[in-house]
Amino acid sequence: MTSGFSTDGSLAIHHRLDVGTVGKTPTERLEEFYQIKETRDFINNNNFHLVALQFPDNLLVDSLPVASKLENGTGAKLYILGDTSYGSCCVDEVAAEHAGAQCVVHYGSACLSPSRRLPLMYVFGKKTIDLQKCAAAFRQFYPDHKSHVVILYDVTYSHVIDDFLILLQPQYENVVASTLHVDGVLCKSQGQILRQNEDGYIDNQKGLYGDRFVNKFGRQFVLNEGCSIDHHSMFFIGKEGATLTNFMMTWNKCSFCSFDPETGAGRVETVNVNKALMKRYYLVERAKDAAVVGILVGTLGVANYLAIIEQLKELIRQAGKKSYMFAMGKLNVPKLANFLEIDVYVLVACPENSLLDSSDFYRPVVTPFEMELACNRSRKWTGGFVTDFQDLLPGGCSYMECPEANGEGEEEVDMSLITGATRPTRPSSVDQADTTSHLSLVHENRSIIVAQTHTAVQDRMATVQSLSQKHRVLR
């Protein structure tokens, strides 16, 4: 029997998990693929004795032989981290700290979001690729040798980009290859990633190249003179997935072509970005209509996640809405179905995990940028899209201060594009004061929130909190 909130169990049996290839890496390739020697040097040179090895699901099958090789060469005590609470592309510093680890070695694809709590080494893995086929696909897509093209790629193919450029040059003189980078001296990766050791690194690059310097998603590149990024095409090396989608939504005015090394096929990306943006704008309208907002914590490792949460809480308060924060690990429909009193959720996560398809959820899930569009009168919809919440913080390239209420102004309203009803765009000062008092109670003493207020969502949260303390159901 199936209902809106439960099924007969058949979905769990037939559900497909997209975890990629799970075959073991041949023994003779382990040393090269997992950079065993470089990792040993990283551990030994820094005198680490407790090391966390974080593997994604598709590489977990190789975790034991890799750990054995590292243990024999270092003598360090190793902990294998798998089944991360959030996206495997992010560094799970919380789990590593629970194990008492002194550093983290992160394997596989990575979003390169800044993590600053523990020393870190990235080992992307050296996936195989037929460069001749890749170059042939590139030439087919760009027959004009004067084309302005930026080469983007999944991090697992970063080791072949220099060789790929050699195949294209000197015919394609306007091709620009992105380089990987991280900010901070605690991160390391042998020959595949740049470190920004100086606080003023970005400012120096911008001073040297101006608007031609682009720094996004752990990638840096310098545009050709006289051309903006909208006048460049993008060529992506890697399979279809969150990384490519993130690029396409951010640079949505650029044409994209891609080459999938696993299939050996290239294609022109014909995904209707405009349609996707229209769908996201619909979610913005849903957020404008919402009275109660749930803030979903989708990461505990990305730097500044607490700062964006506090900024969102204040933004929501100024818009006259109420907010509640949820930290429940990986999201699914049954978890969020427990809180139907929430009108809309905003997900705080890394750029690659923030664009959640919420079509199966009972309530829409938006990004911090979309919530700002809904609540910040200074921010207008221009067609541009921001997936990295770091850009929304003070000092970020997309930061926009929310104007304060004048204290004496009347409530401002507009019309909902979904329901046709009027809604407040700026609450009165009295409404804001009430919201402030409510949120202060939440902040100062979360344990008594349900005892002293009586909304439906708080009653629901009290029930779940009680169950959580007894049975840890939201762990």
Image (tube, rainbow, N blue to C red):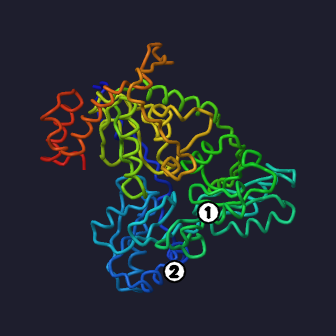
Label 2 environment density (alpha carbons within 10 Å; few <14, some 14–19, many ≥20)? some
Q: Image height check: is 9 above or below 229?
A: above
* Left or right of residue 335, residue 134 in this image: right
Question: Which is nearer the eye, 54 or 97?
Answer: 97
Q: Position of residue 164 (x, y in %)?
A: 74, 65
Quarter of the picture containing the N terminus is top left
For disc 2, the marked residue is 38
| Residue furthest to the top | 420
Q: Image height check: is 329 above or below 402?
A: below
Residue at position x 33%, y 67% from top? 96
For disc 1, the marked residue is 203
Question: Which is nearer the eye, 141 or 251?
Answer: 251
Residue at position x 52%, y 42% from top? 400
Q: Secondary structure at mark 2?
A: helix
Q: Secondary structure at mark 1?
A: helix
* Left or right of residue 359, residue 132 in this image: right
Real-space CA distance between mark 1 and mark 2, rounded to the nearest whole angstrom: 31 Å
* Left or right of residue 345, residue 386 in this image: right
Q: Image height check: is 138 above or below 62?
A: above
Label 1 environment density (alpha carbons within 10 Å; few <14, some 14–19, many ≥20)? few
Which mark is drawn over residue 422?
none
Q: Position of residue 246 (x, y in %)?
A: 57, 47
The mark nearer the N terminus, 1 or 2, is: 2
Which residue type does callout 2 highlight? Glu
Residue at position x 42%, y 23% from top? 409
* Left or right of residue 82, residue 125 in this image: right
Residue at position x 38%, y 61% from top? 92
Question: Which is nearer the eye, 91 or 71?
Answer: 91
Which residue type does callout 1 highlight? Asp
Residue 95 found in image quarter: bottom left
